[in-house]
Image: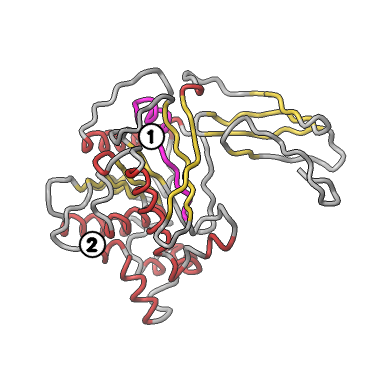
């Protein structure tokens, strides 16, 4: 908080480690309302009195779980070039960090988009069954402004993959999990992230979940809205150097024959007109051709759905399929501890 002359006022203290949203008001208002959410807190509305700098609960949704059973923390990994990469880790209180916890590492890393703590019922189900959920804030996103964004663009895109790999290595080194119990996940640009990471470090994770990913970096700009992403990625037509840079990390082209890749479930949708399903089809086919070993490689195609535009029923079915695939390939038999949905 600041006065109109720029001098600071005591900060508004939030209810916990989370995200404030929908803050608004007029210059002469004495009060306003704002929203707050965290990994274990659905969107909740607070009333704020400006003069006293006090917040009081105005309205909260009813849930069938106890948010006090979970705890969140912000931790930092060190990337290849020494950059500190922030992550949020959330899990049940009292969990033992002994390297055996199923861990779901999610990230995006692009287009100046910031990932902050937020509530998802499917994440609560994961946490309730003993899992750890980690949200990594990679370069390419907007968490630290435009400089952070540009550090993951075009010929600096490898920084994003290095950041994600560093996040996984940190979780393993600090006994949150191990390679046998780590799943890496992301969608759209995050699907590209997962595809490129598993191509570069097939040993990092047990399971990979690339969703609606941009997998062919040499031709992405030729389909639907792909040309609009050139500002972040560059295109193979920009220069011979850009062609070679893109080809080096393009998931479809970076897979090598005879390599044991993680158990992989590629997901896409038949009406995705943003990242056309052909990206996922080509990646799944190339992965099945290149992969050796017994880890399964599947593709799941949602019908009557687009780029994340699915019904609640479809979302529930997708979460169930993804979690089941993860647990099956980790050899984990989860047990519900409480009714969470």
The answer to whether residue 252 is magenta is no
Q: Quadrant of residue 207?
A: top left
Q: Residue 55 versus residue 86: which sits nearer the camera?
A: 86
Q: Is residue 19 left or right of residue 178?
A: right
Q: How many marks?
A: 2
Seen in the picture, residue 10 relative to 125 is either above or below; the reply is below
The answer to whether residue 133 is magenta is yes
Distance between mark 1 and mark 2 Cα atoms: 29 Å
Classed neighbour count for the residue bearing mark 1: other residues with Cα under 10 Å, few (<14), some (14–19), many (≥20): many
Span shown in magenta? 122-138
- The x, y position of residue 206, in whole percent, is 24, 44
Screen quadrant of the C terminus: top left
Residue 132 is marked as 1
Seen in the picture, residue 339 relative to 121 is either above or below; the reply is above
Q: Which residue is mark 2?
A: 255
- The x, y position of residue 20, in whole percent, is 63, 38
Q: Residue 211 versus residue 36: which sits nearer the camera?
A: 36
Kindly indicate whether the residue at mark 2 contacts the one at mark 1 (C-beta within 8 angstroms).
no
């Amino acid at each position: 908080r600041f006065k109109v002359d720029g001098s600071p006022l005591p900060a508004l203290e939030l209810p916990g480690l989370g995200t404030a949203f929908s803050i608004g008001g007029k210059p002469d208002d004495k009060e306003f309302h704002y929203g707050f959410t965290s990994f274990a807190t659905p969107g909740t509305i607070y009333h704020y009195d400006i003069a006293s700098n006090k917040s009081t609960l105005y309205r909260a949704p009813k849930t069938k779980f106890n948010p006090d059973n979970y705890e969140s923390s912000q931790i930092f990994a060190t990337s290849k070039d020494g950059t500190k990469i922030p992550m949020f880790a959330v899990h049940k209180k009292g969990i033992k960090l002994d390297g055996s916890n199923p861990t779901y590492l999610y990230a995006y890393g692009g287009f100046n988009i910031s990932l902050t703590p937020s509530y998802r019922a499917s994440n609560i189900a994961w946490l309730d069954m003993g899992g750890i959920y980690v949200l990594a804030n990679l370069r390419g996103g907007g968490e630290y402004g435009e400089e952070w964004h540009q550090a993951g663009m075009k010929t600096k895109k490898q920084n994003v993959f290095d950041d994600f790999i560093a996040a996984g290595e940190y979780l393993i080194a600090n006994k949150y999990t191990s390679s046998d119990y780590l799943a890496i996940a992301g969608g759209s640009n995050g699907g590209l992230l997962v595809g490129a990471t598993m191509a570069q470090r097939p040993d990092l994770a047990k399971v990979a979940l690339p969703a609606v990913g941009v997998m062919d970096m040499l031709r992405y700009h030729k389909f639907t809205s792909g040309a609009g992403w050139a500002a972040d990625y560059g295109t193979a037509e920009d220069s011979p150097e850009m062609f070679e840079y893109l080809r080096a990390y393009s998931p479809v082209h970076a897979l090598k024959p005879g390599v044991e890749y993680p158990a992989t479930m590629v997901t896409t949708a038949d009406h995705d007109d943003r990242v056309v399903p052909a990206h996922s089809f080509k990646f799944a086919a190339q992965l099945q051709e290149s992969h050796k070993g017994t880890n399964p490689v599947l593709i799941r195609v949602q019908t009557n759905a687009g780029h994340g535009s699915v019904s609640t029923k479809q979302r529930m079915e997708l979460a169930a399929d993804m979690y089941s695939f993860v647990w099956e390939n980790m050899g984990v038999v989860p047990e519900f501890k409480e009714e969470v949905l």
